[in-house]
Amino acid sequence: MGRSRGEGGAVAVEAAIITAIAVPFLFFSIYFFGTWGFSTAQVSAAAKDGVRKAVLAPGNQTMIENAVANRLGVVPDSVTVVTTCERRPQDDFDKDYAPATCSNSLPRGLSRVTVRVEWDAELSAPVAEIFGPSTPTVSGSATRDVIGLPQ
């Protein structure tokens, strides 16, 4: 069937209305998810910075938190950083890692340090509330194995 007379203008108006609604929503969605992806990558990189410091001084939580906060460009109080240390006896690869104290030096043997970071990232976008809170908690972690520490 063919179009009736005058229907072409109505289709153009409907297309203009839908485009005016859909295109900004699409652009803001891309911006929001891009910002969220960037924040997730930054938190993972901050956890890696923290675990590097934790290998040097596992008992110095302040130094680890400062390294994480410096990467994120925030004050240390706005980030949650949890450091865990594990160890297993030297040259005993059959045993699993057991929790160990994160003191000023890692225990002898095979040690593992994990830094977990949680950050309430502020993602400002007009459509952010549609997808969830505008300050979602972004988390990341990094683990480093340390083998053969000096006495």
Image: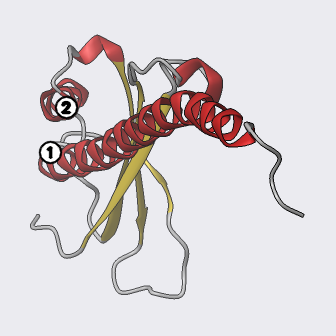
Percent x, y of residue 77: 30, 12
Determine the residue positioned at 21% across, 30% down: 72
Q: Quadrant of the N terminus?
A: bottom right
Q: Nearer the viewer, residue 83 or 130?
A: 130
Q: Nearer the viewer, mark 1 or mark 2?
A: 1
Determine the residue positioned at 20% across, 23% down: 62
Q: Quadrant of residue 116?
A: top left
The mark found on residue 60 in the picture is 2
Determine the residue positioned at 50% across, 18% down: 134
The mark found on residue 53 in the picture is 1
Helix, strand or loop under label 2: loop
Q: Nearer the viewer, residue 31 or 106?
A: 31
Q: Nearer the viewer, residue 139 or 2?
A: 2
Q: Nearer the viewer, residue 126 or 139?
A: 126
Tell me the amino acid under the disc marked 1: Lys
**Residue 53 in the figure: left or right of residue 86:** left
Query: In this rendering, is residue 24 above or below 53?
Result: above
**Residue 102 in the figure: left or right of residue 19:** left
Percent x, y of residue 83: 37, 40
Measured in 3D between alpha carbons, the distance from the residue under mark 1 to the one under mark 2, in whole angstroms, is 9 Å
Q: Residues within 10 Å of mark 1 (few under 14, many from 20)?
A: many
